Image (tube, grey):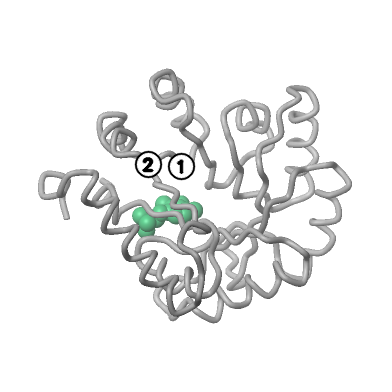
Amino acid sequence: MSRAELPPAAARLAEIRARIARAAKPAQRDPATVTLIAVSKTHPAAAIEPLLAAGQRDFGENRVQEAQAKWPALRDQWPDARLHLIGQLQSNKAAEAVALADAIHSIDRPSLVAALARAMDAQDKRPACFVQVNIGDEPQKGGCAIPALPALLAEARAADLPLAGLMCLPPAGIEPAPYFALLAKLARDSGLAGLSMGMSDDFETAVMLGATHVRIGSALFGARA
Ligand SMILES: *Cc1c(COP(=O)(O)O)cnc(C)c1O
């Protein structure tokens, strides 16, 4: 769908919320326990404002620089908007990420844990942290390898990062359910409650399997350029 054909923001939001609620029901989950993150990467403030006006508060961005360019002005107007950084993060951007974000979903290596811990101590600000798991063991993807997860979580805990949960991007083009179920098991085994999983094409499956945070871009904003 091109932007010109999109229904109004409130209708798009209501549709996604209804789909989340429908998926939550057979899993006997309260849909209020699923945070909808509107992934606004590549979309200008003019496309984001209608969603804010319709009541959406959680947003996701991939790039620190893009988020810095868009969000300070939007937050002046909507101070209770929450920003989730969901893209691969370079350690040299850790301080900017901590300053900007309410949550960081892409923690995947010890050097980044150390850089974020330093930035959080220096700024006395502690965004919620999700460790990204390379759930399909794909070389081109970010995320911590499954066998390395316990050690990385131990480092994050030792560094006093506020660990909220695990995040994944399952392999493209195949049934995602086994990967979501595996992430849920890893989180359970690690004593973590948060599960950041599910995007426009698979969020209902993710909700059925326990997602607490779904990251939805194109289904809310239309296709990215
Ligand atoms: C872009 C992106 C999304 C949203 O993808 P859609 O398919 O547009 O919903 C979710 N998570 C991450 C990490 C992304 O980079």
Question: Which of the 4 image quarters holds residue 199?
Answer: bottom left
Q: Position of residue 11 (x, y in %)?
A: 21, 50
Task: Classify residue 177 as left or right of residue 41.
Answer: right
Q: Which residue is mark 2?
A: 56
97 relative to 160, above or below: above
Specify the label residue 41 is tagged with.
none
Q: Which residue is mark 1?
A: 58
Question: Which of the 4 image quarters holds residue 26?
Answer: bottom left
View quadrant of ligand 1: bottom left
Task: Classify residue 16 as left or right of residue 195.
Answer: left
> What crowding class fits label 2: few (fewer than 14 Cα within 10 Å), some (14-19), or many (20 or more)?
some
Cα–Cα span, label 2 and label 1: 6 Å
Determine whether label 2 and label 1 are within 8 Å by CB. Answer: yes
67 relative to 137, above or below: above
**Depth order, front residue of 115/73:** 73
**Depth order, front residue of 164/117:** 164
Amino acid type at image mark 1 = Asp
- Which residue is drawn at the image coordinates 36% and 61% (left, top)? 200
Q: Position of residue 52 (x, y in %)?
A: 34, 35
- Where's the N terminus, which quadrant? bottom left
Amino acid type at image mark 2 = Gln
Mark 1: secondary structure: strand
- Which residue is drawn at the image coordinates 15% and 49% (left, top)? 7
Mark 2: secondary structure: loop
Q: Position of residue 183 (x, y in %)?
A: 63, 70
- Which residue is drawn at the image coordinates 11% and 44% (left, top)? 4
Task: Classify residue 12 as left or right of residue 25.
Answer: left
> What crowding class fits label 1: few (fewer than 14 Cα within 10 Å), some (14-19), or many (20 or more)?
many
39 relative to 83, above or below: below
